[in-house]
Amino acid sequence: MKKKNTTEPQYVTKEILKKELSKWEKRLTGKIESLDTKIGGVEQRLDAKIDGVEQRLDAKVDTAVQSMKDYTDSRFTQLETRIDGLEQTMVGFGQKLDVQGNKMDRYFDGIVKLVEGLTGRITFDEEHLENHEQRIKKLEEQTV
């Protein structure tokens, strides 16, 4: 028996290869496009998650920065208050020293005047004593 010829040839022709390759190309192109779509969706979801994480981290960093700023501001305010208090105390001490200095100047002026007065008095008394001694000598000379 003889086999009947079928419409399909037993060998592969150039046309058949082109058709098969074209079919494979279309299927692969469809699959690649499908994968691109899936990858795009995953990329968008990842971007959204990353943006959310970035926003949360930014908020936490901003909160921490503000907290540190408030803390340092309060500490500097306390320090400035203490420095102002010390400055006022120093001004008060300076005024007291000025008052005490003026008192000491008056005391020293008084002491100087007293010493000058005593020195003048001593000189006056010495002269007066010398005068009396001369008189006594004269009287003694007259009586002798």
Image: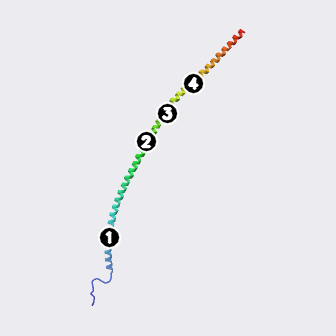
Q: Amino acid at mark 1?
A: Lys
Q: Amino acid at mark 2?
A: Gln
**Which residue is disc 4 drawn over?**
111
Where is 37 relative to 89, above or below?
below
Name the front one of labels 2 and 1.
2
Where is 129 relative to 27, above or below?
above
For the C terminus, the quadrant is top right
Q: Could you tell me residue 27's position as x and y percent?
A: 31, 72
For the N terminus, the quadrant is bottom left
**Which residue is disc 3 drawn over?**
93
Q: CA distance from mark 3 to mark 2?
A: 23 Å
Q: CA distance from mark 1 to mark 4?
A: 116 Å
Q: CA distance from mark 2 to mark 1?
A: 69 Å
Name the N-terminal-most of marks 2 and 1: 1
On residue 31, which mark appears?
A: 1
Check disc 4: other Cα within 10 Å, few if <14, some if 14-19, many if 20+. few
**Which residue is disc 2 drawn over?**
78
Q: Amino acid at mark 4?
A: Ile
Name the N-terminal-most of marks 3 and 1: 1
Asked if labels 4 and 3 touch by Cβ distance under 8 angstroms, the answer is no
Q: Nearer the viewer, residue 21 or 130?
A: 130
Quadrant position of residue 105: top right
